Amino acid sequence: MTICNHFFSYKVSLRWASGSLGFVVLLLIFPVFSIAQNYDETKVPEYVLPDMMKMTNRKQVRNIGDWEKIRRPQILRLFEDNIYGQFPKSMDSLRFTVTENKSSMEGKSVLRKVLIQVSHHGKTIGINLTLFIPVKAALPVPVFVLINNRGAENTDPTRDKKSDFWPAEMLIDSGYAIAAFQVSDLAPDNKETFSNGVLKLYTEQLSMDNGMRAIGAWAWGASRVMDYFERDADIDSKKVTVVGHSRGGKASLWAAAQDQRFAMCITNCSGNTGAALARRRFGERIERINTSFPHWFTNNYKKFNNNEDSLPVDQHMLIAMIAPRPVYATNASKDLWADPTGTFLSLKNAEKVYDLYQAKSTLPANPPVKNYPIIRSVMGYHNREGEHNMTAYDWMNFIRFANFHYQKKKGYGNN
Ligand code: GCU
């Protein structure tokens, strides 16, 4: 694919330096080349997506058996080796301690705080889970768990602070349990300190070019929370929805692809290396994400900087790995950085795998207009009017989507 020259911008940084011997002034000019991001649909280059239905022996995937036994594991491996890194499978011990269990929200829910401790190779890390369980719902109850990449005040267990980013009362009133943990418990979101978390237990990953990094660690943390849900009799562990926003939404997709115990996945404004197709080169690109956040993905991923076409996968294949489980992706109309159209096209291109399971997608051929949620479909989508964020509007539609799939309730609008 050609990259047009006019996308190149030159950032010139000027630095003045003065020597110690009097008045010598040196002008240093550092030209830094970077590719400006494209926001013009007419400039999206032609691209060919990797054929997810063709196995490495060139044979076509014809049925669920071919997909589950051969092609899906091949694709999972490609994502591990090239993008998100390995998902450590062993640990020496896993301990759950309920540190608080009390009535909350004026009696509408029970607040349960749980410390999940993982030990391996003589080291231990703790994941602090905040969980609210509705009192009125029949137990065990389905739960939404947020991989929280924003401040802990968004998931305040005391409910003194309330945030639409995690509107716990709305979920409780709708009959769902809601949980959250901080990504920093697994890997601080910082290129210098990200290894100061779960990677202390799996240091070998750090020297591997296909080793786990921060986003992989956050997704891995979601699986440890899932381990806890399997032991909490109040939680329906067959109805756990993993939710993430933006960088957290990249992790929620990877968690659901890796761990098939998650029944449903929500990926909110996840953009590049989340739900959006990389080959469209619209908004954020691989080179940019790897430069700004070198600690998120494998070393191998850097090979694809300005080289999207050579990636053996694209993000529709990540969604396909979640099939036949429901996935809901969102965007915000002003968040072109996260490529709303590219997100929609990822879902569309994953349909072939959902078709194998006869899991019905009713996504239209083209992206729906703003604020038009597609709910009654195995893959749901909306493009909310507004900015990059996760809001009460988004959550309201996650609930509608979960109601449709978990309860097969009728009467959820015209879509
Ligand atoms: C940056 C980054 C995105 C990411 C976002 C977020 O904008 O470039 O890839 O999704 O932060 O996490 O809010």
Image: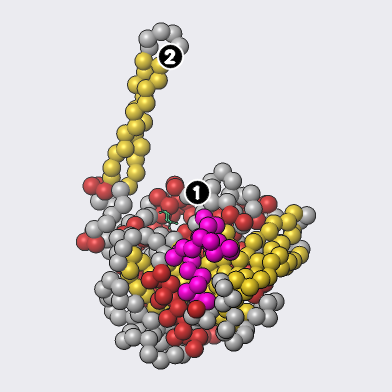
Q: Circle 1 sits in a helix, a strand or a loop, which is it?
A: loop
Judge whether 199 appears above or below 382 on screen: above
Judge whether 330 appears above or below 64 on screen: above
Q: Is mark 1 within 8 Å of ligand 1?
A: no
- Disc 1/disc 2 C-alpha distance (Å): 34 Å
Residue 112, x across and y down, in percent = 65, 70
Q: Which residues are magenta?
A: 151-172
Residue 22, x across and y down, in percent = 41, 8
Sequence-wise, the earlier of marks 1 and 2 is 2
Q: Is mark 2 within 8 Å of ligand 1?
A: no
Whether residue 226 is visible, yes or no, is no
- Residue at x-position 44% and y-position 61%: 246
Q: Circle 2 sits in a helix, a strand or a loop, which is it?
A: loop
Quadrant where the N terminus sits is: bottom left
- Residue at x-position 59% and y-position 46%: 193
- Residue at x-position 69% and y-position 57%: 125
Residue most toward the front? 106
Quadrant where the C terminus sits is: bottom left
Q: Is residue 4 magenta?
A: no
Q: Is residue 174 or residue 257 the one in the foreground?
A: 174
Q: Amino acid at mark 2?
A: Gly
Q: Is residue 396 or residue 408 the one in the foreground?
A: 396
Q: Give the quadrant of residue 158.
A: bottom right
Residue most toward the left? 42
Mark 1 burial class by Cα count in 10 Å: few <14, some 14-19, many 20+:
some
Residue under pointer 1:
294
Residue under pointer 2:
19
